[in-house]
Amino acid sequence: MSQRDQVRAAADIVKVVGDYVKLRKAGANYMGLCPFHSEKTPSFAVHPARQIFHCFGCGVGGDVFKFVMMIDSLSFPEALRRVAEKVGITISESFGEAAYDPNTRVRAALYKLHESAAKFFAGQLTGTAEGRAARAYLEDRGLTDEVVGRFRLGYAPGDGQTLSRYLSGVLREIVSGGAAAETELLEKSGLMVHDAERNRRYDRFRRRIIFPIANDSGKVVAFAGRALGDEMPKYLNSPETPIYTKGRVLYHVDRAAQAIRKLDYTILVEGYMDCIAVSSSGIENVVASCGTSLTEGQIRLLARYSRRVVVNYDPDSAGVAATERSLALLLEEGFEAKVLALPGGLDPDSFIREHGSGRYRELLAAAPSYIDYLTDRAAATHDVSTPEGKVGAANAVLPYLAKVPNPMLRAELAGRLAERLRLDQRLLREELRRLAGTTRSEVHLQPDAAAPKVTTAEKELLRALVENQELADELLPQMVEQGLLEGLVTEPIFQRFLELRRRGESAEPAVLEEPFSAELRRVFYESLFWAVEPPDRGRIDRHLRFLRARRARRQLDALRTAVQEAIQLKDWAKVRELEKAKSNLENELRGLEEGRKISIH
Ligand SMILES: [Zn+2]
């Protein structure tokens, strides 16, 4: 048994979660107030038998390690050690080096390299003449020593060799594979670039002010370098590496997490300097999306701390477009969003320097909701004194409203929009209903009458297979090959399940759910929390028959269409052939339906 499984088996998730959340027994589960989003009625469930947790409100879920990783902002090895300590199991020292993941050794080395590089850059800022010039530049922008130290700002010298030489020394201590292994690691780190023509390596960051970027547990995983002069690009970033995925990191989130939880909202800015300026004014709940437009991964990261956001991007046209894109994503994920557009076309950094943090706080407190912001923008670009202009403005805002998952809230916001534009409420609501019904993502997010329903068969099969992976190995391949899952809401879950098993990996909930959308994860955990008793073999067979019958009915529909087409073409040989196939299928369907004595669907 691996150490991971050993610790998992010894730990009781109810006890571990109970240290953080007040839990109350409710049926087979325990319920409490979710620590990852703010709520007044408990929707956070812990399943003692399956040793998993799931929040029916914000959709987070996983096993005991995932819980500890999220609540304490720890990496997996750290969470494992912490849980092991709680249950009195000693984790061998080598764990975290290679024990659970072949890439861990590389990742651990990359963390060390980045930490060393951060120290190196910081030292350069004060220790060299070149660096002191950079320090003077920061001082001009109002950054005190305290702030420079807190954000670990640094300087990358211009000669392009100093960091490489420095890291070679570090590497000799942590790598035991000679020069080849050292080179490989340096290349993986993204800190060096290779000039193929001259066949030499040099530092990626040269003559730049360095902003270390940490992940949510505070480990430095990448750097951004700002040009001192007019060099392009203005900002240069680390490439993606085994420890850095751009779309999953938010600048400053490690330090902001506590304040975000406490204040229950995040201020989202674009740039590093913006983030530092806001944070230095004593407003700690700020993160930066670092130039890239906000990704789903970043939103999931934010959702751990709060589902309320104030978007404070630059008011230039690129910033406005980025704001609108971000809003669309945030709304889809059920966030409550406000927009702070600073006057005078200023970004947060320049605004605070010109007008002070007091004025910034005032504007922050008065930031309008996204719906008011969008309506204002639409009203400014359309002539709302004419009926056509009103309709144009409404049409600019409606697509955003259609993304709001909660129908009640959606209707309320539509009412407000109608009021502001002096439009007929009823007409606007109808238009919104039409939009909401036709947007695919909307159907996906809001399982209402029009959306495909998750059947009992899917839920119970999923649950049975997760619990019994040998059974999964027996059933999953035929379920996929026979097309039993085609078009089901849960199809991607089953497919990933099979993929993991084919690679010989265990499909634990926490691993299985990883790539899924919030909605799919919700379906998944609902399945795992479904019913008290796991289904027995007889019930599983009935579910399989149900899926086979469903497939047969789909095939019959297709055949009927094909028969109609063949009749129109007067292709009588084809008609006979199709009719024969049709009657075979009808027989099969009859057999399946008769075999299913108890109707449960
Ligand atoms: Zn929650």
Image: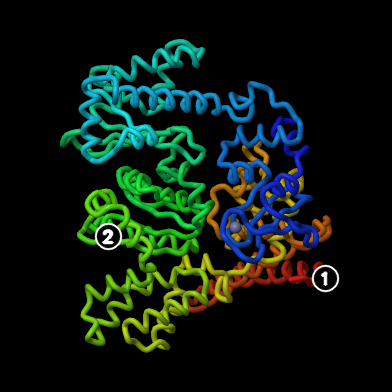
Element carrying mark 2: loop
Which comes before the other along the chain, label 1 or label 2? Answer: 2
Q: Mark 1 points at which residue?
A: 598
- The percent coordinates of residue 282 (x first, y second) are 39, 48
- The percent coordinates of residue 365 (x first, y second) are 38, 63
The verdict on label 1 being within 8 Å of ligand 1 is no
Image: 110 above or below 65: above
Residue type, numbered disc 2: Leu
**Residue 74 shown left or right of residue 586 in the figure:** left
User: 243 and 274: which one is in front?
Assistant: 274
Element carrying mark 1: loop
Image: 491 above or below 207: below
Q: Give me the residue at 42% from left, 88% from top.
A: 426
The verdict on label 2 being within 8 Å of ligand 1 is no
According to the image, what is the colour scheme of the structure? rainbow
Residue type, numbered disc 1: Ile
Q: Give me the residue at 54% from left, 57% from top.
A: 518
| Residue 477 visible (yes or no) | no
Q: Mark 2 points at which residue?
A: 342
